Amino acid sequence: MSFDLAARLAARRAENLYRQRPLLETPQGPQVVVDGQPLLAFCNNDYLGLANHPQVIEAWRAGAAKWGVGGGASHLVIGHSGPHHALEEALADLTGRPRALLFTTGYMANLGAVTALVGQGDTVLEDRLNHASLLDAGLLSGARFNRYLHNDAESLAKRLEKATGNTLVVTDGVFSMDGDIADLPALAHAAKAKGAWLMVDDAHGFGPLGANGGGIVEHFGLSTDDVPVLVGTLGKAFGTAGAFVAGSDELIESLIQFARPYIYTTSQPPALACATLKSLELLRSEHWRREHLKTLIRQFRQGAEQIGLTLMDSFTPIQPILIGDAARALRFSQLLRERGLMVTAIRPPTVPAGSARLRVTLTAAHSEAQVQLLLEGLADCFQQLGTEPSHA
Ligand SMILES: *Cc1c(COP(=O)(O)O)cnc(C)c1O
């Protein structure tokens, strides 16, 4: 046989990089059952606790009763229905952009936007720590592809000097594995100085960031001119599924014409758009979730620092604990799990070699008492692990 898959899998195992899928037997929430074990979990991206919200579920039910279940066709054929259109208008309003375009997943929104905007003869410049879907999009586009140092506008400016053709600068808004936020004012300034466009994927910023949950562009007060291409995903703080690109009328019309992952796929179920419309309303108007989340983040950071854990520079719900070695991160995660706590170990290639971490995520559905339980578990397991976390 020509494919030696067994050897590849064995090598993956030997490097402590083998992936397994925990089987979730409950809805998302702080208290879950995974592989038959009740656990207190700190690893989903449902930052506002809307994935299992009764009003969102009811909107989904009512939507299915009215619109059926399947999207039926692509948006350009006969799959673009009333709820999709209404959701696009609501997303444009949330982002303060003229228009928004709904995609089926964030991965597809990123592939679609980048490949529609740049190609051979053009340039894509990306932050080194961008989400995999953005890196894949850049490579697939056929444009000259280059990475700049993490969140470093000077490093970007140097690469912009050598850029040719239409130039797209691409960054995560909140970095998904680190929790820090992009220095958008500086990046936008550098991009504009060279006539480049800035594209921001704010998958983790919508909901938690901004006074009304409008994410990093609301946080910094940046216009369409500063950030011409704004991507958000709906599977995180919105608690549903799908994604969107927001921007000018010309941008959206261009994506409808040229973004292949938009054109050649069936629209999402209309009932899903009904559910998202409800979660968007809760996300915008019910500020207490953002406030509560901020309290939990403060509590967690204070407690973790007292224990002596290495935190990252983050004020967002993503609060990774840097471990370094993949095997140690995995062991730490296992010790926590034995105590009924679920925190995922994130290993290469998702993060750079030598920077394995426990990715703690907090949500508005957690209580202060639950965060206290996490801190107690972390203290005990950290002690049991013995030596200090190694920076590699
Ligand atoms: C999750 C994520 C995506 C992918 O979105 P999906 O809708 O899950 O496909 C894209 N970008 C970033 C930064 C993400 O964290």
Image: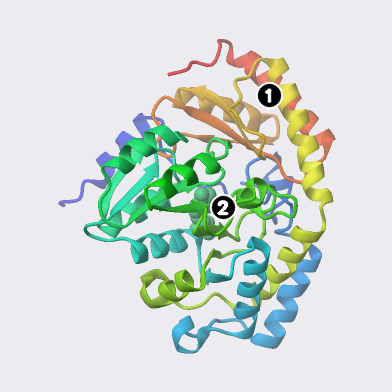
**Colour scheme shown:** rainbow
Name the outermost residue toward the front.
193
Amino acid, disc 1? Leu
For label 2, being within 8 Å of ligand 1 is answered yes
Please tell me which residue is depicted at 40% across the width and 77% down the height of the picture: 263
Task: Please tell me in which quadrant of the rendered image residue 51 appears.
Answer: bottom right
Do the residues bearing badges 1 and 2 touch, measured as CB atoms within 8 Å?
no
Q: Residue furthest left?
A: 2
Tell me residue 181's x, y (percent). 57, 39
Left or right? Give the position of 147 relative to 225. Answer: left
Quadrant location of the C terminus? top left
In primary-sequence order, the first of circles 1 and 2 is: 2
Q: Nearer the viewer, residue 287 or 275?
A: 287
Q: Is residue 251 above or below residue 323?
A: below
Position in image of residue 39 (x %, y %): 70, 40
Give the distance between the C-alpha atoms of the residues marked 1 and 2, in whole angstroms.
Answer: 28 Å
Query: Which corner quadrant of the image does residue 264 belong to?
Result: bottom left
**Which mark, by number, is residue 195?**
none
Q: Which residue is mark 1?
A: 378
Secondary structure of the residue carrying tag 2 is loop
Q: Relative to 365, is 113 on the left or the right?
A: left
Residue at the spot x=31%, y=39% of the render?
159
Q: Closest to the observer: 349 or 202?
A: 202
Q: Is residue 68 above or below residue 33?
A: below
Please tell me whether mark 1 sits on a helix, a strand or a loop.
helix
Residue 243: horizontal and vertical position, in percent?
A: 55, 63
Mark 2, Cα crowd under 10 Å, few <14 / some 14-19 / many 20+, is: many
Mark on residue 203?
A: 2
